[in-house]
Image: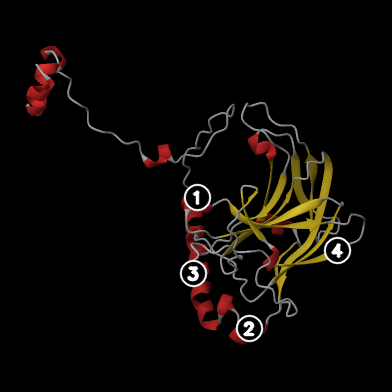
Amino acid sequence: MSLPKLARLPSARLLTSVLPHHQLLLPPLSPLTIPCRTKIQQDYRRPGQPIQKEPPLNFNFSKGIKNIKKHFMLMKDEFFGRFVGPQGKPLIEHILEQNLVIWEFRGPESLKQWTVSSDQEIGGQSEAHLKMGRNVNTCFLHGKLCTTTPRDGETRYSGYCNMRSKIPKASFDRKKHYDWTSFNTLHLRVRGDGRPWMINIATETYFSHQKDDIYTYFLYTRGGPYWQEVKIPFSKFFLSHRGRIQDDQHPIWLDKVNTIGFTLGDKAEGHFQLEVDFVAVCKDYAHTEEFAYEMYERNPKN
């Protein structure tokens, strides 16, 4: 049959004329099945790591009653605290406040607000430990840094240790944010061993792909037995994503701060230590800079 005649035929007759009859008897298509959401969005498991099985559900009725009472008490404090003022403080005190201590280490209970991690999560050999100082009034972070990469065929760089605060929780485990809009400077009292550290501030994000966005600046310790007080303006923090500085920079959202962390990754193998007395925020009236880095205008008109 010629090509012009084939073009005039309907689709069904076209198939019967081109293909043999036995090839048209195709099996019926099965209904389309889509995997459940948990299977698609499960956490990434690195090569060589065993599959972690979820522990069986163990429900305790008495613990459940205690937690319900605790959360209702927290909700009561939140509700009546709004009538007092911002964050449960009188309005005049909130406006005139110039210094606010966010974290201070005055006992073992204060260490529960922090988590410690290292490159052992990806198969590395670095170690990090957190404990109280000698006078039980400071936090002492120590360990050993190792840059040996794991032999998994995927990891190219290794060697970091991190100390990070936990996200505060409101009643019924709702996420709570720190509001630092009244302040413009981060105030620390630390004592290190001369290594450079990175201070990371994580804020709330609107999209899931921004969950690894953090604001970073450097902390240079002097070493030796003496304490040093460090003041870093929030305008100096720059935006980074998984260790890479972003071209599109913008200031920190100080009304939705989630966590703050200290990271060591100077590629110098050996032991390290960092002692922290307190982490605070303050209002420096002499500092008027809004943002220290250039912000590119999107879609400029000219």
Label 3 vs 4, first from the N-terminus: 3
Label 4 vs 1, first from the N-terminus: 1
Amino acid at dot 4: Gln
3D distance between C-alphas at marks 3 and 4: 39 Å
Return the residue found at the far right: 225
3D distance between C-alphas at marks 1 and 2: 35 Å
Tell us which disc is closer to us: 3 or 4. 4
Amino acid at dot 1: His
Residue at 9% across, 25% down: 12
- Closest to the observer, 291 or 267: 291
Q: Which residue is mark 4?
A: 228
3D distance between C-alphas at marks 3 and 2: 25 Å
Q: Which residue is mark 2?
A: 95
Label 1 vs 3, first from the N-terminus: 3
Picture layout, residue 257 above or below residue 145: below
Residue at 83% across, 46% down: 272
Element type where label 2 sits in the image: helix
Q: Quadrant of the N terminus?
A: top left
Q: Position of residue 86 (x, y in %)?
A: 56, 78
Rendered image: mark on residue 75: 3
